[in-house]
Every structure is written in C-alpha cells, then in structure tokens.
Image (tube, rainbow, N blue to C red):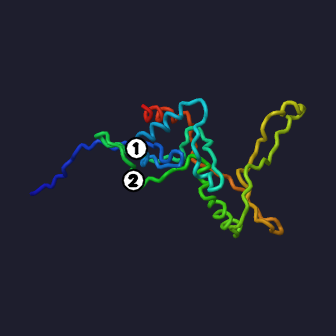
Amino acid sequence: MTVKTKKVSNPKKMQYRFGIAEWYGRSFVTLTAAERRAYAEEQFQESLPNELCPFLSTQSNTEKCWKKGGVCSLRSYQKSAEGSVSLDQRNSTIRTTCPSRFEQNRSIYPWIASILLKNPKVVPIGQINFLERVPLIGGSEQEIQGREDVGRIDNVLVVPNSDPLEWCPVEIQSVYFSGQKMASDFEAIRD
C-alpha cells in the first residue's frame, strides 16, 4: 500500500497593516525616501504644512490642505516573514480618510445628482446649518451664546431654475482616523 504524504512546511504568516496610500494627493509608493521624510518632518511643525490639496484646487484657484497629517487615504500593506514590505496582494482597495478626497474634479456632485435627481446639472452648496441650539427649558439664551449649531448638512445639491425647486442633501463620510494616531508612522518615516 502506498501512502501519499503531503509535505508540511511551517510557513510564517504574512502580517498585514494599514498605512498611508496617498499623502497630499500623491501616491505613497511613488514618493521618494527624501519626499517621504520631508512630508513627515512637516508634521512636527507648529502650524499646518503649506501643501496644496489637489482635490480642492482647480486651474484657477489653489487650496491648501486643511487636514492635520495630510493623509488622503489608507491602504493595506503586507510584511513577509523575511521583513520585506509590499502592497497587500489580496486585492485590497484604498480607503478614503479625508472628505476633500471626494472633491476630485468635482465629479461626485453630478454623479449623485444624475442618480437622485435625474439631472447632473446641479449647483453644490456647502455646509448648511439646519438645527440651532436652544436653551434648556427654564434656561437662558446666554447658555447657548458662542456655541455652534448642532446640525449641518455637508452639501445641498440644487438644480438651478427648477420649478418646483429640485434639491437633495449630501452627507460625505470617509473612513475616520485620528491624526495623532499617525504620529508614530510619521516619526518612523522621518527617522
């Protein structure tokens, strides 16, 4: 009787971790080591870096990145047992971490409007306050002075000259992470 045996190896598992995919709109994997160090060094300055946001900027108007850390998106990386790091080979996708990332070419608004309003020709209006703080019963107006409104709509899309008015609210959500949690990554890149 012949017994087939399967050769059992003891492969060490691949480790996976999320890291920067886009930094100030540029692919992390295409940045040079010097560019990565320069971006990382900027994170330890008192003021926000003077980097442009390619997703908010247009040919006629440049906008600075407003987000601490400047990380636009994250992606999964893999580390082999030997220590080499590469892109995750499991078809992992990029996760947007900055709401401004959705503003690229301002194409998101016509896309949403074509689906919801059946009309891609809309005007986006941003940050609409829709709920106001009111004093508690028996409270005074002074207790709410200086406090922000409690509800905002990220954008409202309006079809110009429509009668009746055609519009829809848009809330933009991205994967959230705290910029402070990236400090150890920035330190490792800088050093």
Seen at 42% across and 49% down, the residue is: 30
| Residue under label 2 | 90
Seen at 40% across and 44% down, the residue is: 16
Seen at 85% across and 34% down, the residue is: 136
Numbered mark located on residue 104 in the image: none
Cβ atoms under marks 1 and 2 closer than 8 Å: yes
Compared across the picture, whether 115 is left or right of 175 comes to right
Sequence-wise first label, 1 or 2: 1
How far across and down, in percent of the image, does residue 50 sit? 59, 40
How far across and down, in percent of the image, does residue 36 sit? 45, 40
| Residue under label 1 | 16
Q: In the rendered structure, which amino acid carries the disc numbered 2?
A: Arg
Q: Residues within 10 Å of mark 1 (few under 14, many from 20)?
A: some
Distance from the alpha carbon under mark 1 to that under mark 2:
10 Å
Res. 151 image quadrant: top right
Q: Nearer the viewer, residue 47 or 29?
A: 47
Seen at 60% across and 54% down, the residue is: 102
Res. 131 image quadrant: top right
Quadrant location, the N terminus: bottom left
Name above or below for residue 155 compared with residue 138: below
Q: In the rendered structure, which amino acid carries the disc numbered 1?
A: Tyr
Q: Nearer the viewer, residue 121 or 75?
A: 121
Secondary structure of the residue carrying numbered label 2:
loop
Q: Nearer the viewer, residue 38 or 169?
A: 38
How far across and down, in percent of the image, does residue 186 sit? 48, 35
Secondary structure of the residue carrying numbered label 1:
strand
Res. 116 image quadrant: bottom right
Quadrant location, the C terminus: top left
